[in-house]
Image (spheres, rainbow, N blue to C red):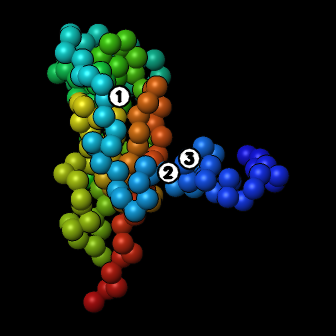
């Protein structure tokens, strides 16, 4: 990415803070405040019959039954989407997102999520009830754990136009010293 050197410093800082330059500056809407489902509302929640999902990638086809069963339950995310989740072993979860209107299926921004309570930590790290948290009337998806086994904490994603954008990362505190 190129940063123009002829821009005044204040304009560059403002552009970064507003998120106009991807990857730089604050990604959260309000500095110092953790994202909330209410910060990412959707206009309406689809109430019609969901279109059967059309898995196209290898990953989606591998879990097509679980995705299809989830879609049959109706919209649960971002107005007209369905988050389908499934286990991948002890303390592990995977998911995909299906559009209930078009049938298109979207892969998540990570392969798997591992539970993040290890021997030197405790359940107080868990701030959300599930490893993947979402609401029908919000485009915010919160991953609680360690995506792909790294960077444990809470990852806040905005889902828009079929893309997940990380808007904030709230890391777990460093492990407590062994006693």
Q: Earlier in the sequence, mark 1 or mark 2?
A: 2
Q: Position of residue 91 (x, y in %)?
A: 26, 53
Marks 1/2: CA–CA distance? 23 Å
Residue 48 against residue 77 in the figure, above or below: above
Comes first in the chain, label 3 or label 2: 3
> Label 2 neighbourhood size at 10 Å, few (<14), some (14-19), many (20+)?
many
What's the distance in space between the residues labelled 3 and 2, CA to CA?
6 Å
Residue where numbered disc 2 is placed = 27
- Label 1 or label 3, whichever lies nearer to me, is 3
Callout 3 crowding tier (Cα within 10 Å): few <14, some 14–19, many ≥20? some
Mark 1 closeness class: few <14, some 14–19, many ≥20 residues within 10 Å: many
Name the mark on residue 19.
Answer: 3
* Mark 1 or mark 2, whichever is nearer to me: 2
Residue denoted by label 1: 97
Residue beneath the point at 32% across and 86% down: 178
Which residue lies most toward the bottom here?
179
């Amino acid at each position: 990415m190129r940063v123009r050197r002829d821009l005044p410093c204040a304009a560059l800082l403002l552009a970064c803070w507003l998120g106009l330059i991807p990857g730089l500056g604050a990604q959260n809407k309000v500095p110092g405040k953790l994202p909330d489902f209410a910060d990412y509302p959707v206009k309406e929640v689809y109430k019609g019959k969901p279109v059967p999902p059309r898995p196209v990638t290898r990953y989606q086809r591998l879990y097509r039954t679980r995705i299809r069963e989830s879609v049959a339950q109706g919209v649960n995310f971002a107005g007209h989407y369905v988050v389908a989740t499934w286990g991948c072993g002890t303390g592990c979860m995977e998911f995909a997102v299906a559009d209930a209107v078009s049938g298109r299926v979207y892969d998540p921004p990570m392969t798997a999520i591992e539970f993040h309570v290890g021997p030197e930590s405790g359940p107080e790290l868990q701030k959300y009830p599930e490893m993947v948290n979402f609401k029908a009337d919000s485009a915010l998806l919160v991953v609680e754990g360690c995506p792909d086994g790294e960077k444990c904490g809470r990852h806040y994603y905005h889902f828009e136009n079929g893309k997940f954008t990380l808007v904030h990362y709230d890391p777990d505190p460093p492990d407590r010293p062994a006693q």
